[in-house]
Each structure stands twice: as C-alpha cells, then as structure tokens.
Amino acid sequence: MAQNRPKIAPQTLKPNFCNQTRNNNNSFARREKIKKQRESLPIASVKERLIQEVKAHDILIIVGETGSGKTTQLPQFLYHAGFCRDGKVIGVTQPRRVAAVTVAKRVAEECGVELGQRVGYSIRFDDKTSNSTRIKYMTDGLLLREALLDPYLSRYSVIIVDEAHERTVHTDVLLGLLKDVQNVRSKSAISHDNIADKKAKNGSLNEKENGTQSISFLKQCPNSQFPPLKLIIMSASLDARGFSEYFGGAKAVHIEGRQYHVDILYTVNPETDYLNAALITIFQIHLEEAPGDILVFLTGQEDIETVERFVHEQLLKLPEANRKLLTVPIFSSLPSEQQMRVFMPAPPGHRKVILATNIAETSVTIPGIKYVIDPGFVKARSYDPVKGMESLVVIPTSKAQALQRSGRAGREGPGKCFRLYPEREFEKLEDSTKPEIKRCNLSNVILQLKALGVDDIIGFDFMEKPSRAAIIKSLEHLFLLGALTDECKLSDPVGHQMARLPLDPIYSKALIVASQFNCLEEMLIAVAMLSVESIFYAPREKSEEWKTAIKCFSSPDGDHLTLINVYRAVDELLEKKRVELSNEKNLKGKSEKILRKWCKENFINGRSLRHARDIHSQIRGHVEQMGLRISSCGDDMLQFRRCLAASFFLNAALKQPEGTYRALSSGQTVQIHPFSVLFKSKPECVVFNELVQTTNKYIRNVTRIDYLWLTELAPHFYANQS
Ligand code: CDP
Ligand code: MG
C-alpha cells in the first residue's frame, strides 16, 4: 500500500524502480543481459535433448531446481521446434496467478514481443491473450474451465503442467482430466488413418479402439483428427516417481541445477512471536551481514503488512546511514504490477527485504537473494469432512518446504538461511506437504467435474483419491445449494449456471439467488469484496483512530453491508472527482492519487480495494452474459439481508447463552471475529462467510439475520431443525 512505501531516500528510489527500460541504451543493455542470462541457465545446455525427449514421448516428467529455466525456456524451445504449427498453442499451467502473469511478462520480453501477442497469459478475471498467442501461461484452474467449453483441449498441441509438486487441488484434477484427454487424442491420431477403413468395414468403432476402455468420460471420439497431445509435467523437487507411476511409467528427465552452499542456522529456543523474531533477524542481517538481499517467508498478506510496517518504524529509529533497507511485499492477491517490483534491483547501496508468502518457494525466482528467514509456518487450507467445515490454518511447513525455502539463498552464491525454530523441531516436521485435495472442500471441483460430464466422482482417476467422506459431504453440499438433482446430475439451469461462474459455488449461488431477490447489484459488490483479503487495514498501534474511521462505513446489520458502504463511498468519491477533474490532463493518474489518499485516511487497504473493483467488473460481465437480472434493492437492506440468509444458510450461527455461537450445520462452537462490526453487539442469529481457526474458531464477514428466515427461505435444510 502507498502508506507502506519505504520512507527512506525516495529521490533515489524513483529512477531505479520506475525507469528501467525507457532509455534505449538501457533497453539494449537489458536485452543483452537477458540473452546472457538465458544462455547460462542450466536448461540451455540440454535444450536439444529435451526437444528430442518431447518428440519421442507423449508424456514427459521434467524435474529441475527452481531457477533452472523450466518455466520460461521450455515453451520457447518447443515453439521454435515447431510445436505450434497449424496455429496450435503451447499451454503452461501454474498453480498461482502471480507466476502465470510474471512469467508471461518475462517470456514476452525475452521473445521481444508485446504481451498478449505471441506470448500471453490468462487467469481468472484477467485475460491477456489474442488469436496470435502461441505460448499461453494460465492457472491450472483456468485450463479446467476451458475444458468445459473444449473438452478435448483441441487448441493445444502441448500442455505443460508446471509446479506439479505443489499438488493443488486443481493440479490434481487437471492431471486426471489430461490423462484421459491425452489417451483419447493419441488414439484418435494414431487410429485416424484407419478410421475411415474400419468404419466402412465394421460400421462403427468399438470402445477399445476409441481409447476409452478405462473410466474415460470422453465417450465419443470426434470425427475430426487431433494431433496427439504432448503432456509435460514439471516439478521443482522430488516425487518424479509418483507422477511417473500415475502416468503408467512415463519417462522422467532431471535437469541439474546450480546450488551453492547454504548455511542453516537455527534458534536455540522456540520463538513464541515469529513476526517479532523475523523482524529482529531482518535487522540483525541488515546491520551485521555482508551485502545481499533478504527473503522472508510469512503466512499471508496480514503478516506481511505487519512486518512491513514494523520494519519502517524500526528504520526511523536508526541513524540515517543504516536506513538503506527497502521492503518489497509479494503475495498472490497483490496486483501484478506491484508484484513485479520484487524483480527489480534495489538502488545501489540499498538492501532489499522481500516479504513473501510461500509463493516465493518455487513459483517465482527472485534474483539477488543471499539470506532467507524461515519462521517455519505456512497458511494452509484444512477441511473437516465430518463437520463440512473448511478453514485456513497456520501450520508448520514440511521438511520439503523448509529445504526448498533454504535453497532460495544459494542460487547465485553461498547464502544463509535462518530458521526461526530449534533444530530438534526440524526433525519433527512432516516429510512432505499433504496434497490439497486431501484437505479441502471439494464442492468447487466436483461441480466442475460434473459439468465436464464426469458422473462417477468416486471412480475418477485421481492421483490420490480424496476421502469418500469428503466427496460425499461435498456432493451433499452441492445438492443443498440446488446445483445437483436427486440423481446427482447437474441441475438445470441452476447447476449449469453455477458451473459457469468462476467463483466458489456458494458465491455463485448467492448471485443467482440475488437476481431473484432484486439485489444483484448489492450481491455483486459483496461477493467482489469477499473475494479479496483484508479490505480494512488495521494497524495495531492506531486501533483507536481505525475504529473511528471505520465508524462512518459500519452498518449495525453487519460486515456485508459495511463492505458495500465502503465500495459505494469509493464510487461516489471517484464520480465526484471525475466531474471536478473532467478538464484536467492525466485524469486516471490523478484519481489514482486521490484514491490512495482516501484509502490512507480511511484505513482501507488500497491494494485489496482495487483488486475487488476489478473482480466486480469481471463478474458483472459474467452475470450479464448469463442473462441474470441485475437490479438494486435500493435502501431496502432488509431485502438484502434476507437474500444473504437464503444464500448462506449453510453458514448460519445462533447465539449461545454464554455469548459464543453455534454453527448450525456443523454444531461447532465459534466466535465472532474481533474485526467484525458485530463483535460487540452479538445479535441472536447470523450468517457468515469465513471460519478461521487461530487461538479460537472465529467467524468473519458476519451479518445479522432473523432465525425464522432460515426456515422460511431454506426449508429443505431447516424445516426439521428446531
Ligand atoms: O521454472 P524454473 O524455476 O526452472 O526457472 P524459470 O522460472 O524459467 O526462471 C529462469 C530464470 O529466469 C530465473 O533464474 C531468473 O533469472 C529469470 N527470470 C526473471 O528474471 N524474471 C522472471 N519473472 C522469471 C524468470
Ligand atoms: Mg518454474
């Protein structure tokens, strides 16, 4: 955020951060530098061999250290080797949006083309591709969505599933899907020459010849011929064997990376406050160690912004000469132009400290890192299928993650990694991270699989099967939301509409319900604001000022209405300024500045707000396309709250005599989060959108409702409950 920008030497920051390529000499020098960098990447020496391997094998597993050049170089090798003939596309999936965007930008620059032309990216709510795009970076979730429209992924000649070791739920589902598509497409291509003959002789092909003898859901092989699909699974670390076994003994190729020695340092005792420990370590390095940038692994945006603030405060206490420390945050919801700042070198004489989530473990390669600080935690999804509750919890990293993190310090020379826990704790860590599919709510993927025509979810060829209980719970959840029929088929139109929206099923349903309640305008805002992390920015040391500022938006009815008030206040502000500034040049720049100032004064997180506004316009586009009626309930907020009850009935909670709440669908005892506007007033009955487990189980984004609305609006769930 603007107010978090370093306060040190702004005059020296500007030219270095903003003006990299303006000057021609600079841009020539940069091109030369990039060329040299590319030639020196470990992957460059095995280019020809890799191309041969891809030509020889339909499925290939490539394992190589982060930074060896897999993501940026391999697609370019394949492009030049002719894999994009006939307008076919090389698709590269990433588990993270940031990687898709930053890598696409980098590759476009390396190719000397404009982003969105030959090289582009496509992520949810942001598409930078065109008809001429041949190398397309995208999130794994997005490719799954594309499969809904094009089940054979016929535009692609090669699909590279990158960062497969992360085992996100989308990667796992995608692997199952691609295995099937590939099977059908290879057989389609091989047998195509014979198809006409055989058809003439036998009338039709039998199942086996169609390549669908296992659990394939692509029952019909289309008449048109597809070239075989080349499938490449890329991973930074280990488990090539697991992937190889899953793909019937597929060939694995290892690219040797360069790794320098990294000294691992542990704390003597466990640290109770890891943020404070991280802060102390940052300054210890800054003041005592040789030049080199620092990478700190934190659990999320909130932690990052807290540490960023602490660092700036601490810097002000130091003598001028010691203040040359620059913070750069990176996390997945950060707008991409701000994410790009991590790649820019610090001004001469300055040290850069990158505050990152586990995004920097493997997804992005940041040059210049010599020191890594690893508190040993990660924020992970966790799902309890019995209670049907998903929560985000901060848990210890696995050994594999700890190794990956420390490896970041040894890319360009020897480095140091400061683990903020004792050595004996390392031995207790799990070896590797549990695949997400084993610990998340499956409603979203099940809805997509159903839309893809996979009826038998339990029989689907997952690399690692989620538990039966989790599958059944999610099917039940989708049924209760009206997405599935009694026969477990996608319902029409609701299920199909929900599958089309790139949102969590519960939010998709909320938009559909809202169009019936005449408050889709309001729900679009609420869903957009709920889709980003922390709209409010609540510095601990200014909590009184924060509370006062927040009062002008807060609604006694709850957080959803409060979020809408914030959004509308921004709309009004920008509209007013647009009129006032209509004759001025650089209107966009000026309104940006005004918005930044306003956000600062009102303790609003500018980054999150901009992201929410972006999401809003995208989902508005989707619902318009779907033909949903977009209208506003005006001042009738009762109507909107009824709509929230009808939408989020699965997340309702009732006050208990002692002031805690009982979540009605799971029976868990929960509390309203202190950041909720309802924290003090504690109404009788509420709906909520998030359950976070820290020291307590907290519900966030809470709105007051009337319990009777639940029996009236969700009788299928509440009629028999007292
Ligand atoms: O995929 P892998 O981790 O093997 O490497 P990569 O992402 O292809 O990155 C190879 C090299 O390109 C990195 O070591 C960086 O030097 C550079 N790179 C960069 O400067 N900026 C990016 N956005 C991505 C890569
Ligand atoms: Mg990579």
Image: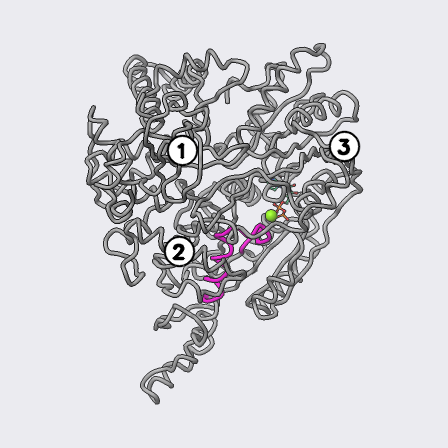
- Check whether the beta carbons of the residues at disc 3 and disc 2 lie within 8 A of each other: no
Residue under pointer 3: 267
Q: At x 31% / y 61%, what residue is drawn?
A: 488
Type of amino acid under label 3: Thr
x then y, percent, for residue 21? 57, 30
Q: Is residue 270 left or right of residue 590?
A: right
Give the magenta-colored segment's residue range.
161-181
The residue beneath circle 2 is: 446
Q: Which mark is residue 661?
A: 1
Q: Quadrant of residue 713?
A: top left
CA neighbours of label 3 inside 10 A, class few (<14), some (14 to 19), many (20+)? few
Query: Who is closer to the viewer here, 497 or 395?
Result: 395
**Mark 1: few/some/many CA within 10 Å (<14, 14-19, 20+):** many
Q: For label 2, count other residues whose C-alpha is less than 10 Å away and answer few (under 14), some (14-19) or many (20+).
A: many
Residue 163 highlighted magenta (yes or no): yes
**Occupied quadrant, residue 530:** top left
